Image (cartoon, rainbow, N blue to C red):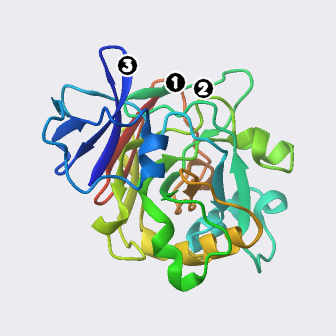
Amino acid sequence: MRYYTILLNGEEKAAASRDGKDLFVLDAFADMNALIASGGIREIPKDAQKVSVSDAQLLSPIPRPLQDVLCLGINYTAHAEEAERFSRESFGGERPYPIFFAKRVCYSQGNNAPIPAYTGLVDSLDYECELGVIIGKDAKNVKRENVTDYIFGYTIVNDVSARNLQTRHKQWYFGKSLDGFTPMGPCIVSADEFAFPPKQKIRCRINGEVRQNSSTGNLITGIADIITMLSEGMMLKAGTVIATGTPAGVGMGMTPPTFLKPGDVVECEIEGIGTLRNYVE
């Protein structure tokens, strides 16, 4: 099943689709957070209003996450290498354990929505295409063999980053958390649609040029280990979003570094989920 949040007659509505073409409004749920907490649906209600995906305004599937988005840093080998080239002080050194950080999100914008450039504050605006994992029920002390029981589905997250703020403050929270820095979408694909762990093609294009091209099967720390480790020490509430890290090809990894500017179009694509398109303004 595919789950969407759409804007219909000025109201945000949760919706579902079997094929990604026809959407059916789920009036029984106040929003996507309520739908996730319920465990989702197995069948489309017979009386559900039908809307074509081409006629709907797609918002982020979770416009207002209940908690900060949890993120993995430096979780693809080739990205680790390019990050260290950009700033050895900030990204170099040995990493015997995963890098976890949080990303504050007051509002997550969806498909075809703008990414603010913050001209004057940010001089190194960067993109990061990532697989997002959505937790389906409260998770604490999850055993590795039971991880799949706690995954509601998957989405695309663009972990937009201000590199000058990220490296200046030595701690990534501010440089990752400016308003508008967490586009998500276009939908959540239920976990049963993919084999576990998902090994899907992941790409990012800037103005049509392919910059990132990898597979979600190349994670250094896999999804099972991520959820097991985090849940040892904290409750992962239903609806929690985990961004699993980005592959090589970000702007800071290019020679010379090439960052986003107003007018650029960013397309993040993951096989089986779709394409999240945003533009810089």
Relative to residue 4, is residue 242 drawn left or right? Answer: right
In this rendering, is residue 241 above or below 245? Answer: above
User: Between tags 3 and 2, which lies in front?
Assistant: 3
Q: Residue 117: which disc? A: 2
Residue hosting label 1: 262
- In the figure, is residue 95 to the left or right of 41? right
Residue positioned 49% across, 31% down in the render = 109
Residue 39 versus residue 48 in the image, above or below: below
Few, some or many C-alpha atoms within 10 Å of disc 2 (few <14, some 14-19, many ≥20)?
many
Residue 199's spot in the image, x, y percent? 38, 73
Q: Nearer the viewer, mark 1 or mark 2?
A: 2
- CA gap, disc 1 to disc 2? 6 Å
| Residue nearest the viewer, comparing 234 with 252 | 234
> With respect to residue 167, does 233 lie above or below?
below
Name the residue: 14% across, 35% down: 47
Whether pointer 3 and pointer 2 mark residues with C-beta atoms closer than 8 Å, the reply is no
Q: Amino acid at mark 3?
A: Glu
Question: Which residue occupies 74% across, 63% down?
Answer: 234
Residue lying farthest to the top in this orientation:
10
Q: CA distance from mark 3 to mark 2?
A: 28 Å
Q: Where does residue 238 sit, x and y in percent of width and height?
A: 55, 54
**Cα distance between the residues tagged 3 and 1:** 29 Å
Q: Name the residue rendered at 52%, 75% in the picture.
A: 147
Secondary structure found at label 1: loop
| Residue denoted by label 3 | 11
From where the camera sits, is residue 208 visible?
no
Q: Quadrant of residue 226?
A: bottom right
Element marked by disc 3: strand
Residue extending furthest bottom?
145
Q: Name the one closer to the observer, 212 or 139.
A: 139
